[in-house]
Image (cartoon, helix red, strand yellow):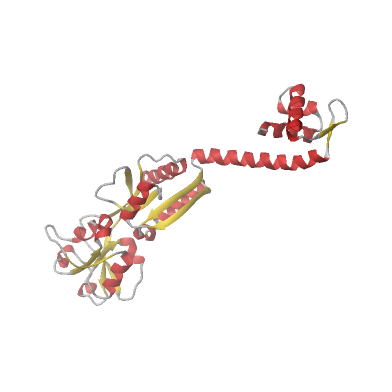
Amino acid sequence: MELRHLRYFIAVAEEMHFGRAAARLNIAAPTLSHQISALETMLGAKLFTRRTKSAVGLTHSGKRFLVEAQETIKQATHAELVGRRAGRGDAGSISIGYVLSAGFSGMLPTSLARFREKHPDVTFQLARVQTVEQFKALSDGSLDVGFTRTPHRYPSGLTGFIIERQKFCLALPEKHPLVAQKRITPAMLVNEDFVAASLEMELGFWANLSSVAPPGVTLRIVARAPDVFTVITLVAAGFGIGVLSESLKRISMPGVVFREIDGASRTSDHVAAFRKNESAPVVKAFINFLRAGVRAN
């Protein structure tokens, strides 16, 4: 049995007339009659009773079958629509990883909201994932797009583009002398103690300390932390100063004061990372949307 058999049957059942149904289907009446007979043979049941040569009525079996046939065609039509929308990138699911600074900046939620305005049938699965782990997940296919810090270089098979630039800021213990300064420059930081990211996070945080260090100076690291919250916690405990993306000033923790720094050598850049050979239409549509947003700005 094929979908065309169901469509032929529904047309006859709704018209109650072979001639009118054939005209509606744009096929010859004898062809339609033959197809209905074939359908009845496949089902082993009579679907119509003849009233005249062309006029018909539904049998009990025909009435029951009509309900199922209409539901089947409705579902098939819906499946076809979903398939076409998915092929255009208008439907589907996208798995996204993000670092905390990308979330706090508002760039990530804004991008998702604007994309869904035009693609309401697209769903997103979000997970906060550090930069190194994002690249692993992108490579093995468990993530589709990563919102992360700019790496030295992309792992093989991956690429990306900058979507946002943030300034760096200082996270200071609230009783630190530099809190009283209206203007903090790299030269003031030479003899200070710093809390840095763990080695596992260095791919995403390599630029933090070097961006606020005077040329040729290596700042003193006294503690390392596995994540941003731990960096800020250690700062609050007085271990040292943290250097963070500006958006992370939105994190409120007792004992920590955030200050801007004048003269940082670089910005904290975020990228959209993805597979070079990405083939999923919905993912490609989202990437193109992000790229268009960068160009517009």
In this picture, residue 237 sits left or right of residue 139? left
- Position of 178 relative to 212 (above/below): below
Taking depth in this image into account, of 225 and 175 the one nearest to the observer is 225
Image quadrant in which you'd find residue 260:
bottom left
Return the residue found at the far left: 216
- Position of 218 relative to 151 (above/below): below
Rendering coords of residue 73 (x, y %) = 67, 39
Rendering coords of residue 154 (x, y %) = 28, 46
Identify which residue is drawn at 14% across, 69% down: 191
Rendering coords of residue 218 (x, y %) = 14, 61
Taking depth in this image into account, of 279 and 61 the one nearest to the observer is 61
Taking depth in this image into account, of 93 and 1 the one nearest to the observer is 1
Q: Quadrant of the N terminus?
A: top right
Rendering coords of residue 253 (x, y %) = 34, 73
Identify which residue is drawn at 17% across, 69% down: 192
Residue 196 appears in the rendering:
yes
- Position of 150 relative to 81 (above/below): below
In this picture, residue 255 sits left or right of residue 50? left
In this picture, residue 3 sits left or right of residue 292? right
Identify which residue is drawn at 39% across, 49% down: 145
Return the residue found at the far right: 51
- Position of 70 relative to 106 (above/below): above
Return the residue found at the far bottom: 175
Return the residue found at the far front: 44
